[in-house]
Amino acid sequence: MPLIVCGNEGFNNIEVSGPGIQELLGTNSCASQEHNSLWFDVTIKNGGKLAFTLKPKSTDINEDFDFFVFGPNASCTNLGQAIRCSTTNPAAARLSNNHTGMSLAANDSSEGPGANGDSFVSSIDVKAGERYFIVIDRPIGSSNFTIDWTGTAEFNDAPQVEIPSGSTIDLEECDNKAPFDDLIAVFDLTKNNFVIGNQGNVTINYYANNTDANTGANPISNPSSFVNSSNDQKIYVRLENSITGCYTISNFNLKVLNGANIQETSLEVCDQDNDGFVNFSLSDINATVLVSGSPSDYNFSYHLTEVDARNNERSLSNSYTNATQNEQEIYVRVVNKTNSFCSNISKVKLVTVPTPKLSNTVELVQCDDDIDAITFFNLEEAKSKISTNHENESITFYESLVNAQNNVSQIINTMAYKNSIPSTTNIWSRIENEKGCFKIKEIILRVSTTNIPDNFLREFESCDDIENDNLNGVSLFDFSSVDGEIKRMFENINQQVIISYYENQSDALSEVNVIKNISSYRNVNSPYQQKIYVRVDSKINNDCLGLGHHVTLTVNPLPDFTITAPAFLCQNSFVTLKSDIVNDSLNYTYKWRHKGMSSVLGVNKQLMISDAGEYELTVTNALTGCNRVKYVVVGLSGSPTVNKNDILIYDDLTSTLNEYKVIVKRENIGVGNYEFSIKSEEGVQRPFQLNSEFENLDSGKYKLIIRDVNGCQPNAEIDFNILRLPRFFTPNNDGENDIWVVKGLDQALYKRGEITVVDRLGNVMYNDSVFGLGWDGKLKGKRMPSDDYWFFMSLTDKLDNSYKYEGHFSLLRK
């Protein structure tokens, strides 16, 4: 829908978005079409020059606007060709600004596209009654724009917004819509319909933005109950002549004033007689009904009904007794003192809160721990006597009624309160429920004499039971037999009793930390000697009937000693086991045994042994009978032995894997823990190692040495050879590999040997002792050719063991 141009007024901040239906293509000489277009409908009232200036809101030279003019008397269904158009790009044309339009000074009817033109074409001579369409298009950019009519032609008049002098069309409302602190309210925009005045044929509509107001699109559908989206929100009003279509746009603001930010609340008052009726001071509600703000900024009134509250009728007096038992609903009216038309209504509950229900008389009886009639009371015991609902209430204690009423100087140590007046004294308790309602109750504290004889004492002894190998003075006791003895005392006076046991007098008086299992008790908190306090209470009223130290537990220490012994015993030798005793002056007995055996090996502090194994020593205190057993392990070790069968030699005569190493077989060399070393014939010895294998050996003679890490002597030694047979030799007299000879042979290990070399036909090339100089590659002074040759070797060692070997090698000549 095109915008109607009226009253020769310009348009401000018009937003353009989208091409709509494509209607420009092929209808202009400026080679363009619609991009983001807006149509103006211009009807001439008085003839003259039609001219205008369009100014983008953005001054960016790249913001590009085009326009097209159709007419006169064109219609939407028959536009014809544009009589004026401009599609010049201001940046391409190097213009100083991005303005465009029709000018009285211009003389061309079209220009563009791109760099062609200066963005202005000539004005149009128009006559009264003629109708034109002006299309504004924005091919580049996103700016709003304004348009000013600069010609002499006049348009139909627009309606006028008539506001009486001294009046305003801005609207104010109170924030009376929950939540009350968001500055959102309901407005009746139709209150401003009066701006039409006496103008005929004029309609009025309201809009949320300027563009909608200009285009007539999206009018506010519920102007009589419009909810603002922000405070000081601007609303646009459009007055339109229903005959000419001319319109005018005006605006006004919606302002939300702060009303009372209130909430539903309740007032709870303690009901001292628990009849469901109390006297309420309604002004106590003022602060709690407000979510924010100060009560001093508002006026409050209270009413029985919501209608009365809204009409501000029949308000209640501040001192009000509820008419409905336990709970009643009333209404509060809150008025802003500054903006008296701002009033809010909320519901209030008046609730009576029951107070604790207490026993008539409360008395605590505690046994005297001596003869002064002053002792310690566990006031916590009084709670169950004061109230049956004590677990859900807070009960505190005070030495005076005034302190209890004012909740000051509370008794802190309620588990061990000492009476200040002998025999009988009074204190006060304050009983408060979860709602904060309280009552005061007096408590009588009475001291009674114990009914257990002072000379009644049972003693129990036990040996330290060594927990985690610790001599800690702790052991296990069973003193449950005392229970029966004490019960029989009270059966004589027809009393049913509860007997409990404690580690100290304070716990017994306070009845805390009771010993739970008297048949398997460990004295962990008092090593070596523990006093046990007995307390006897009546099953009927829990009064104390007896209290005192009547059980003593004694832990006798075990012998404290260590055993000194070597870790190992060499074969065929003796060692001595020794015991070192703390407090050796005491009377101890000793028994040595093999662990797990019954036969006694010795009864002295020391024991000489020749066998390895695990031994045990039992040391007993002859006076207490407490004994302790300790164990010691003596391992067996011994010097090594080794022979030729205990070693494996890997060399050219024993392996085909090109390995040169020796491995000691551990099976038969002895029972000890051994380490190994080898020494070369040059006297170089490797460090001792636990590994019995030596690798990467050169040819030659070696000595293997084995020793016991525990020092058992003597060491074991054996000689061995690593033999290497060359795979080739090069007899060219260069001093390297000129002779083929067996490397590593030792005449100290072998008493004779012979080697024979033959060619591939079996002809003997060389024959000599293995201890000879070796073959130089000649036969009878003649050099033998490069080829493969075979050898046969026999050896006899010093023990007359014979060995035979054969293989082949290469003779290489250049």
Image: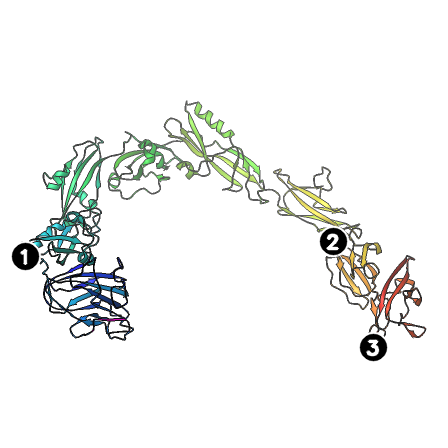
Classify the position of the N terminus by image quarter: bottom left
Residue 740, position as x, y percentages in the image: 86, 69
Residue 448, position as x, y percentages in the image: 37, 31
Residue 734 has which mark? 3
Q: SS of the residue at dot 3?
A: loop
Amino acid type, mark 1: Pro
Query: Mark 1–mark 2 contact, CB under 8 Å?
Result: no
| Front residue of 243 and 179 | 243
Mark 1 or mark 2: which comes first in sequence? 1
Q: CA distance from mark 2 to mark 3?
A: 51 Å
Residue picked out by circle 2? 673
Mark 3 neighbour density, 10 Å: few (under 14) some (14–19) many (20 or more): few
Which quadrant holds residue 234? Answer: bottom left
Q: CA distance from mark 1 to mark 3?
A: 133 Å
Answer with left or right where residue 705 lies relative to residue 364: right
Mark 2 or mark 3: which comes first in sequence? 2
Mark 1 neighbour density, 10 Å: few (under 14) some (14–19) many (20 or more): few
Q: CA distance from mark 1 to mark 2?
A: 121 Å
| The magenta stretch spans residue 311 | no
Classify the position of the C terminus by image quarter: bottom right
Which is in the foreground here, disc 1 or disc 3? 1
Q: Is residue 359 above or below residue 706?
A: above
Q: Is residue 190 above or below residue 687?
A: above
The magenta segment: 108-117
Amino acid type, mark 2: Asn
Which is in the foreground here, disc 2 or disc 3? 3
| Front residue of 401 and 174 | 174
Residue 164 has which mark? 1
Q: Is residue 233 visible?
A: no
